[in-house]
Image (spheres, rainbow, N blue to C red):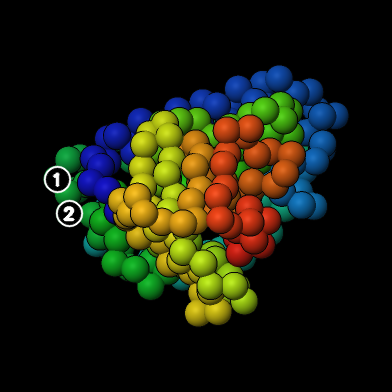
Amino acid sequence: MGERSTSEILDVLRSAHSRFVAAFDSLDEEELTRPSYDDGWSVAQVASHLGSGTEIFRHHLEAGGLGDPAPDGINEPIWEAWNAKSPGQQVRDAVAVVTAFLEAAETMPEDRKAAWRLELFGLDLDLEGFLRMRLNEHAVHTWDVTVALDPASTIAPNAAALLADSLPAIAGWAGKPSDEQVSVEVRTTSPELAFRLDLGPGGVTLTPSLDDTATSSLTLPTEAFVRLVYGRLDHEHTPASVAAKGVDLDLLRAVFPGF
């Protein structure tokens, strides 16, 4: 994971939220039920997912700042409350709760930010790691909405650069075993990054690499590589600049089916 300041992550998270708000500003009440990229979810339901998740994370934010454990038993009631909202309420409340979360994180005293710790999902997190989780969720699901309005939509470059820091961990968790054993040198642009992607019956690993002698390679924008790992690089949303050599792109899509 790259070294980033909490203020940098918060700036990109606020930028992602602004993009999310702008997408819904263009929709009327009837259009809130149009399908998103997420199978079976409308764009309002994506907003509800982000809203409920951010409400849960607001409780976690407070706990970590106070040195308390993550609160238990809060998820189900929050999800049920959000599921009961109308599409318009889901969108309006999502905008409000994310805004409140950002304000609470941004105004936290610096000494509390530095001391912030929380055990969550089996991880010992500092505030940077915690905010990265929120950014990953927000940026990817914002694309699930924007691409439903514009098929050429991409993940914002500033968000993609930060999400790329977490890709080794995400790839190992989200990637599925493959009958075919392949090592792929991945080169991305905007920003320029280099990885080695290994897949096979034992699962998936992604590590930094600069092996120019590899026989299998994948070249693509960083945001497209993020979407591949998150299961969002189908044929219709693959940039023309993506180039795969010695590896079938459909194999990689199958290894990363999405979540």
The residue sitting at the bottom extreme is: 202
Answer with left or right where residue 7 lies relative to residue 43.
Answer: left
Write the residue at 62% across / 34% down.
239
Where 8 falls versus 135 (above or below)?
above
The residue sitting at the right extreme is: 30
Q: Nearer the viewer, residue 68 or 188?
A: 188
Query: Whole-Å distance between the Cαs marked 2 and 1?
Result: 6 Å
* Any part of residue 98 in sight: no
Residue 256 spot, x, y in % from top left: 60, 60
* Label pair 2/1, CB-CB below 8 angstroms: yes
> Does dot 1 land on a helix, a strand or a loop?
helix
Q: Name the mark on residue 59.
A: none
Q: Place residue 117 in its image quadrant.
A: bottom left
Residue 212 spot, x, y in % from top left: 35, 50
Where 60 falls versus 157 (above or below)?
below
Residue 252 spot, x, y in % from top left: 60, 58
Where 2 falls versus 87 (above or below)?
below
The residue sitting at the top extreme is: 26
Graded by Cα atoms within 10 Å as few (under 14), some (14 to 19) or many (20 or more), the crowding at tag 1 reads few
Q: Name the mark on residue 115.
A: 2
> Does dot 2 land on a helix, a strand or a loop?
helix
Answer with left or right where residue 227 lies relative to residue 63.
Answer: right
The amino acid type, in three-letter code, at marker 2 is Ala
Graded by Cα atoms within 10 Å as few (under 14), some (14 to 19) or many (20 or more), the crowding at tag 2 reads few
Q: Name the mark on residue 111.
A: 1
Q: Place residue 196 in its image quadrant.
A: bottom left
Q: Nearer the viewer, residue 204 or 61?
A: 204
* Any part of residue 169 in sight: yes
- The quadrant the C terminus occupies is bottom right
